[in-house]
């Protein structure tokens, strides 16, 4: 059936439209919607990989830095510590040398001496490395050891009452510094011995650094030291050397027989060969203990020997020696002064003026004495009294001065007898001190009084 044209045309248009829609529908179904290129699926894996690589690099860098730090901590840090400790050991050696020189100066001048000892050190680069505790040190006085002289007889009669050949024994301490290091294990202890020698005490040997002039020709110088000191820390410490008994006074001594030579003994840890090296310029190879007679050269030690810890110096006979004795004390600057027990005892009185003076009757003569301690040095502020059976002493009791001296003025009495009967008369003036348990040490002057009448 043939439709009218308008309807046919409409139906044709519908048909075409339907066909077109059908074709478009087919075409649309064949098209897949895709996201914009910015968010395309093929790009996302690349970005994730890049982030992972960066993160992995950071982790690897951190691990490398940690490894480098660990290596530095185990290798560089110990080197830094050892260098610090070694430099500190050198500084401490210099400080102990200064202290040893202080002992010589204090004995010579009688003045207080002081030196700083750098007890410890500080490790550098603490912001980089982890260090153990900063190094410290310990300084302390050592055990007291005997120091003695025997067979020495004073040339002066009054002094010979005390220095009469018997053994005179003095006690002396040393001073030892011990470091506490973490790396420099071979660092030596440093010690000033009771006899005054400074040495480095290494694990396998002892090396002398400085020694005092114990013997210089015919001068024998012995210094005893005292004190009770202990300090362990890292801060610098001021150490004082106090003069307890010093003087420029020397006592001239000699031996009595060839069988009893002047002999000095001391306890020491240093071996015999070390002491022979110290005293090499004073030892006379031409004399010995069995043949000690002086051969009149410039060397006066006949023999050096050691038994156990005791060193013995035997001097040539037939010579006079100048004996210098002193006593010093070790202490920290913050410590109070040493106790009275450290002071040598007042020991004897000796005449400083003529013991047999002559004076005209009714005139005055000065009589001088000196108070000395066990080191033969003057002692001040000791009461000395004087008495006489006749005549007058203006001030019969006085205190010794800084030089240990006391001077009395004795006015001689008048002699009653005529000069034809007696031209002079002798009077004894007795001076004395009280020491110990009431023991009197006495010096007697024999004053000859001249008769002035015809």
Image (cartoon, grey):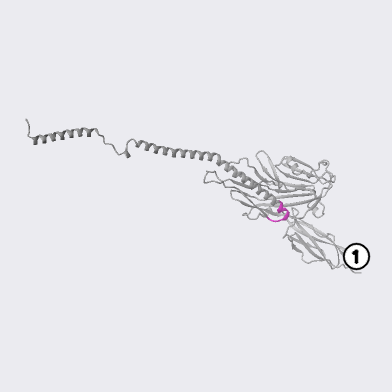
Find residue 397 and report its horizontal and vertical position in percent: 75, 63
To which quarter of the image does residue 11 belong? top left
Please tell me whether residue 107 belongs to the stretch shown in magenta. Answer: yes
Magenta region: 104-112
Where the C terminus falls, by quadrant?
Answer: bottom right
Name the foreground residue: 298 vs 54: 54
Was residue 88 drawn as part of the magenta stretch in this picture? Answer: no
The local crowd at label 1, few if under 14, some if 14 to 19, many if 20 or more residues have their Cα within 10 Å, is some
Q: Is residue 228 left or right of residue 221?
A: left
Give the percent coordinates (x, y) of residue 93: 65, 46
Residue 105 seen in render = yes
Q: Please identify the quarter of the rendering in which residue 2 is found.
A: top left
Instruction: Say which quarter of the image contains residue 183.
Output: top right
The single residue placed furthest to the bottom in the displayed view is 454
Secondary structure beneath label 1? loop
Residue at image position (53%, 40%) is 72
Residue 381: percent from the left, percent from the top?
72, 60
Which residue is denoted by mark 1 in the rendering?
423
Above or below, 244 against 15 in this view is below
Nearer-the-camera pick, 34 or 443: 34
Q: Nearer the viewer, residue 288 or 364?
A: 288
Q: How many marks?
A: 1
């Amino acid at each position: 059936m043939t439709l009218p044209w308008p309807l046919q045309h409409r139906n044709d248009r519908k048909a075409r439209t339907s066909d077109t829609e059908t074709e478009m529908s087919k075409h649309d179904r064949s098209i897949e919607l895709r996201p914009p290129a910015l968010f395309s699926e093929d790009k996302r894996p690349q970005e994730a990989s890049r982030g992972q690589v960066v993160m992995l690099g950071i982790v690897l860098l951190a691990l490398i830095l940690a490894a480098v730090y660990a290596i530095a901590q185990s290798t560089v840090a110990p080197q830094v510590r050892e260098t610090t400790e070694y430099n500190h050991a050198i500084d401490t050696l210099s400080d102990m040398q200064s202290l040893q020189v202080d002992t010589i100066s204090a004995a010579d001048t009688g003045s207080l001496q002081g030196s700083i000892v750098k007890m410890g050190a500080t490790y550098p680069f603490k912001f980089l490395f982890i260090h153990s505790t900063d190094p410290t040190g310990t300084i302390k006085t050592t055990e007291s050891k005997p120091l003695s002289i025997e067979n020495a007889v004073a040339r002066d009669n009054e002094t010979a009452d005390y220095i009469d050949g018997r053994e005179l024994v003095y006690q002396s301490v040393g001073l030892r510094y011990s470091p506490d290091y973490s790396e420099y294990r071979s660092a030596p202890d440093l010690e000033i011995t009771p006899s005054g020698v400074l040495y480095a005490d290494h694990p396998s040997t002892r090396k002398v650094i400085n020694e005092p002039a114990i013997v210089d020709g015919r001068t024998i110088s012995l210094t005893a030291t005292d004190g009770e000191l202990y300090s362990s820390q890292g801060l610098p410490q001021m150490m004082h050397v106090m003069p307890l008994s010093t003087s420029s006074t020397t006592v001239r001594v000699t031996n009595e027989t060839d069988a009893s030579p002047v002999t000095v003994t001391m306890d020491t840890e240093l071996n015999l060969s070390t002491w022979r090296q110290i005293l090499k310029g004073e030892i006379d190879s031409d004399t010995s203990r069995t043949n000690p007679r002086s051969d009149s050269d410039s060397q006066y030690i006949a023999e050096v020997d050691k038994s156990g810890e005791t060193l013995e110096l035997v001097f040539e006979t037939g010579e006079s020696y100048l004996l210098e004795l002193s006593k010093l004390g070790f202490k920290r600057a913050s410590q109070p002064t040493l106790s009275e027990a450290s002071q040598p005892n007042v020991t004897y009185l000796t005449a400083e003026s003529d013991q047999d003076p002559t004076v005209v009757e009714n005139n005055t003569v000065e009589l001088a004495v000196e108070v000395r301690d066990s080191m033969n040095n003057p002692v001040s502020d000791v009461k000395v009294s004087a008495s006489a059976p006749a005549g007058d002493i203006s001030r019969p009791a006085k205190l010794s001065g800084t030089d240990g001296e006391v001077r009395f003025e004795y006015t001689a009495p008048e002699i009653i007898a005529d000069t034809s009967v007696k031209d002079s008369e002798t009077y004894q003036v007795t001076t004395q001190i009280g020491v110990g348990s009431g023991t009197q040490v006495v010096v007697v002057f024999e004053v000859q009084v001249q008769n002035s009448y015809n």
